Amino acid sequence: MDRLTAMKVFCEVAASGSFSATADKLDMSRAMVTRYIAELEDWLDARLLQRTTRKVTLTDAGESCLRRSQQMLALMGDIEEETTRHDGELRGQLRLTSSMSFGFAHLAAALSDFLQQHPQLKIDLNVSDRTVNLVEERIDLAIRISSEPDPLLIAKPLASCPSVLVAAPGYLLAHGTPTEPAALTHHRCLSYANFGKSRWQFQRGEEQQSVNVSSRLSANEATVLLHAALAGGGIALQPTYLAQPYLAAGQLQAVLPDWGVPAMTIYALYPSRRHLSPAVRALLDFLHARFQAQPW
């Protein structure tokens, strides 16, 4: 089992290129990561990694070891799945990734409830708005919000994700409330750096408008823009799953409520339908049932 753990540590170092990041990921000390790599190299009598002050790269022997280690770990996962099928308990560990805002607002609570139902299961959730390679980083499931999911992945819709323009009452009192999309050009707008940064689309019935907004503050994460809006920083385009509690409490007001913005969808993405583990299937069904019932 020590060698299997060493293989797991080695695969994480190969994926991240960092001993420190691997230590954080696996919840162990950097010294322990170094020890596992050293023991694996001693066992194989080969140098697996080239270490410099800037990065860690694989040697030729390391490339070969990585492929074999991934096969061994996958085989171990298959053995755990076979055991699961016999006694009905879900076991092992699932690796998920999600956006920061959705992970904070809803996914963390959903996963906690799911784990209460399956006490032998573990989940490792990576929250990030960057695009990750699910195969290379061995991610079982990605929860992403998109209008066009990656066509190379299997995409299961979990829920609709409407958005709304919002601003703090104090900002609107000081700067006025826009009555037409074109009026946004005279306002401070808070924009999402990775989507529609300076051009926002609106629709009312058959009427459509596209507006170039002036953004003095942009960010790559929706929760940051939400709190900027709450602080009176301007008008923000927010998913309703984040904004709804603050709208209900009066801390934010809807802006241009008669105008809609392009809707997106919350998807569960995974690499292949083949060999989908019982744990992943169970989690997919759980998340679909839970989020379909949300009044976002």
Image (cartoon, rainbow, N blue to C red):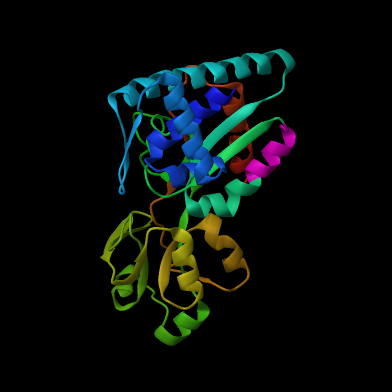
| Image: 156 above or below 30 | above
Res. 229 in view: yes
Based on the displayed image, in which of its 4 quarters is residue 110 positioned?
Answer: top right
Based on the displayed image, in which of its 4 quarters is residue 192 positioned?
Answer: bottom left
Residue 238 locus on image (x, y percent): 46, 60
Judged left or right of residue 206, residue 138 is right
Q: Nearer the viewer, residue 194 or 237?
A: 194
Q: Nearer the viewer, residue 243 or 270?
A: 270
Q: How many marks?
A: 0
x 63%, y 35%: residue = 122
Residue 219 locus on image (x, y percent): 37, 63
Q: Which residues are magenta?
A: 110-119
* Residue located farthest toward the bottom when viewing the structure as drawn: 174
Residue 4 locus on image (x, y percent): 54, 23
Residue 142 locus on image (x, y percent): 47, 38
Q: Nearer the viewer, residue 190 or 93?
A: 93
* Residue located farthest toward the left when viewing the structure as drawn: 212
Res. 257 in view: no
In magenta segment, residue 184: no
Give the quadrant of the N terminus.
top right
x 30%, y 48%: residue = 54
State whether the magenta stretch is mostly helix, strand or loop. Answer: helix
x 47%, y 41%: residue = 22
Q: Nearer the viewer, residue 126 or 200?
A: 126
In magenta segment, residue 114: yes
